[in-house]
Amino acid sequence: MAAIAALAAGVISDSIALIGFGLNGIKDSISAVIFLRHQKEREQEEVNSVGTGKALFAAGIVFF
């Protein structure tokens, strides 16, 4: 929620710092969802190393 507020405030005030802060918060939220989803799948069934690699790759793309 803070990420969206910072992003909106940054756009309204033309502040690149606020926009960057908002995008950073969105990135962190997306990567957390990826890891939580992977953990949930891991608890439900045995996941091989390919599943782990896919989750780490997706999180890496988000951070890039």
Image: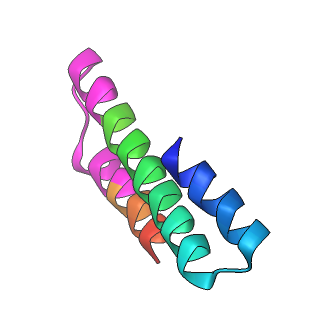
Residue drawn at x 22%, y 20% as measured from the top left = 43
Tell which residue pokes out farthest to the bottom in this image: 16
Residue drawn at x 33%, y 35% as measured from the top left = 36
Residue drawn at x 25%, y 34% as measured from the top left = 47
Tell which residue pokes out farthest to the top in this image: 44
Residue drawn at x 74%, y 80% as measured from the top left = 14
Front residue (pair 42, 20): 20
Specify whether 47 is left or right of 17: left
Task: Based on the picture, tell me whether residue 56 belongs to the magenta stretch.
Answer: no
Task: Based on the picture, tell me whether residue 45 belongs to the magenta stretch.
Answer: yes
Give the magenta range.
39-55
Specify whether 49 is left or right of 51: left
Specify whether 37 is left or right of 20: left
| Position above or below: 62 against 15 | above
* Residue 39 coordinates in the image, percent (x, y): 26, 32
| Position above or below: 27 against 39 | below
Front residue (pair 26, 7): 7
Main SS category, magenta section = helix
Q: How is the image coloured?
A: rainbow
* Residue 29 coordinates in the image, percent (x, y): 44, 48
